[in-house]
Image: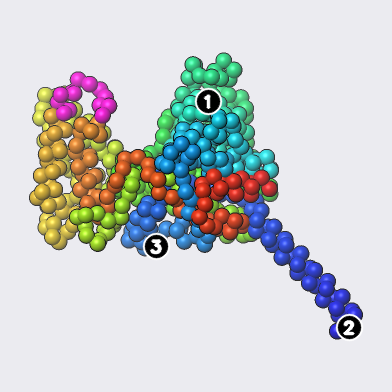
């Protein structure tokens, strides 16, 4: 080898090494970061929805096909079973804390979130959810307080956050007068406006927002938004529509950080409402495809991370009556969330009783058929959605129970313990779950670990089994760079 050749070779090798280093630093420094949290989404929800999506849409879930996987232990410092606040504090801030704590450690001291770190490092920041914007999961990304119920204080922290984009439900207690900072800040929404936020309340105004519009606070409900099954799409944007708008507004050369929560998955888990849970899972999965389109256009500088915060409902794929079978496609005909069905059926009964009439089962039957996809005519041997005689009897007797209970409460405007006292909704819910081969072990959270899946720049940093706060610390590290 001549001298010149070896010099050339050395130069080439040095250039190649530099390229490799740059590729590695690019790979570890995503400019654009998507952090997706399915509330109440653990392995059972992912697997049930995987099967549901294959049967209904002919494809598996996007979130389950991502190339890097992790498994996160979820316990907070004071229990084995976490609530959403402690779980989100771990994921957002990298610190395990007490159940109920928002962005604070076990001693009550504030801890910085990855979203704040991303903002400090020059990225634009966005928060999206279909619960209230001050609910535990989103709150941990911008607020600090000891108790998740301090909605006013959380709303004030939102108004002071400086984040660029908020979209979701409302800010309950934003004008509450007896909370800590009232004298100092007054109404939290007015404070947000004073701090430069454009407040948006309709879908049309939201869709009309264009880059350069400044900081936005978009609220499509006074409280939580609706389940995917129940939402009014004329009036409210889907999670995917909210994410598309966030990308459009936040895209800039310095990058962005967007946290999107699928919060209704958890509510359907608490309600043991399988059809609603599956639809909320699909709506969440759809949002990740939106991020993937962005990743394809910005390869090497975009990270997509998807995780749950805990499991909700103790969902089992398989149940005693179904043997070794699972028929999740049978929930595809459910068109109404169980809570909404319960309200509608009780309303119907109350109206009849107030007029001095007796509610007829036939009328409610149509409502049951429409809400759950059940059939009252036909051969149950040939069509599993046709109700068997015993299922029919269970529904009818639940209806009679509810009529009697409504009659005893007809003067009252609100029923506080509807779930225990009214049986029709819970009976229909149980029959549908049995037909699908699904069972639920809890109305609350369980201690199962959650699965995280990732793709894109820096994804490999998250692989393996770890504590949820370790996952949060790794995320914060990337966001800080
Ligand atoms: Zn949660």
Q: Name the disc covering residue 153, or none.
A: 1
Q: Nearer the viewer, residue 467 or 293?
A: 467
The answer to whether residue 442 of the structure is visible from this angle is yes
Residue 59 - label: 3
Left or right of 67 on screen, residue 342: left
Local crowd size for mark 1, using a 10 Å CA cut-off: few (<14), some (14–19), many (≥20): many
Q: Position of residue 359 (x, y in %)?
A: 12, 32
Read off the magenta span: 405-417
The answer to whether the residue bearing label 1 lies less than 8 angstroms from the nearest atom of ligand 1 is no
Q: Position of residue 250 (x, y in %)?
A: 61, 44
Q: Quadrant of residue 117?
A: top right
Mark linked to residue 334: none
Q: Secondary structure at mark 1?
A: helix
Residue at the image point whose x is 27% and y is 56% from the top: 318
Q: Residue at x 75, y 69 (%)?
A: 16
Mark nearer the N terminus (2 vs 3): 2
């Amino acid at each position: 080898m001549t001298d010149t050749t070896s010099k050339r070779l050395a130069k080439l090798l040095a250039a190649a090494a530099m390229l490799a280093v740059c590729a590695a630093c690019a790979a570890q420094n995503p400019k654009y970061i998507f952090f997706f949290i399915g509330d109440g989404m653990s392995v059972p929800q992912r697997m049930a929805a995987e099967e549901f999506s294959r049967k209904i849409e002919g494809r598996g879930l996007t979130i389950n096909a991502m190339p890097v996987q992790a498994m996160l232990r979820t316990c907070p410092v004071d229990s084995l079973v976490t609530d959403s606040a402690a779980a989100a504090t771990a994921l957002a801030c990298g610190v395990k804390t007490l159940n109920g704590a928002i962005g604070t450690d076990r001693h009550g001291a504030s801890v910085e979130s990855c979203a704040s770190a991303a903002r400090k490092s020059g990225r634009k920041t966005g928060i999206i959810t279909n619960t209230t914007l001050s609910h535990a999961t989103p709150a941990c990304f911008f607020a600090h307080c000891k108790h998740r119920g301090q909605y006013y204080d959380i709303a004030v922290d939102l108004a002071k956050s400086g984040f660029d984009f908020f979209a979701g439900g409302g800010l309950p207690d934003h004008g509450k007068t007896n909370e800590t900072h009232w004298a100092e800040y007054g109404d939290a929404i007015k404070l947000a406006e004073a701090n430069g936020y454009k407040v948006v309340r309709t879908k049309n105004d939201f869709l009309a927002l264009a880059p350069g519009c400044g900081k936005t606070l978009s609220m499509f409900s006074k409280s939580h938004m609706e389940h995917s099954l129940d939402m009014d799409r004329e009036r409210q944007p889907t999670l995917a529509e909210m994410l598309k708008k966030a990308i459009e507004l936040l895209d800039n050369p310095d990058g962005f950080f967007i946290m999107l929560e699928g919060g209704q998955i958890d509510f359907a888990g608490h309600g043991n409402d399988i059809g609603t849970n599956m639809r909320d899972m699909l709506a969440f999965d759809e949002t990740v495809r939106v991020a993937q389109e962005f990743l394809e256009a910005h390869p090497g500088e975009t990270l997509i991370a998807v995780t749950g915060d805990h499991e909700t409902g103790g969902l089992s794929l398989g149940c005693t009556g179904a043997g070794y079978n699972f028929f999740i496609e049978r929930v595809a005909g459910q068109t109404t969330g169980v809570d909404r069905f319960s309200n509608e059926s009780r309303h119907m009964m109350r109206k009849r009783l107030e007029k001095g009439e007796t509610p007829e089962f036939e009328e409610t039957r149509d409502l049951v058929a429409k809400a759950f996809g059940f059939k009252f005519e036909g051969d149950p041997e040939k069509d599993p959605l046709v109700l068997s005689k015993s299922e029919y009897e269970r529904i009818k007797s639940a209806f009679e129970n509810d009529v009697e209970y409504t009659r005893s409460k007809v003067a009252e405007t609100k029923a506080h313990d509807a779930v225990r006292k009214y049986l029709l909704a819970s009976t229909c819910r149980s029959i549908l779950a049995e037909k699908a081969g699904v069972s639920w072990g809890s109305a609350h959270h369980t201690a199962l670990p959650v699965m995280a899946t990732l793709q894109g720049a820096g994804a490999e940093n998250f692989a393996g089994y770890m504590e949820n706060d370790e996952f949060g610390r790794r995320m914060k590290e990337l966001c800080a760079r």
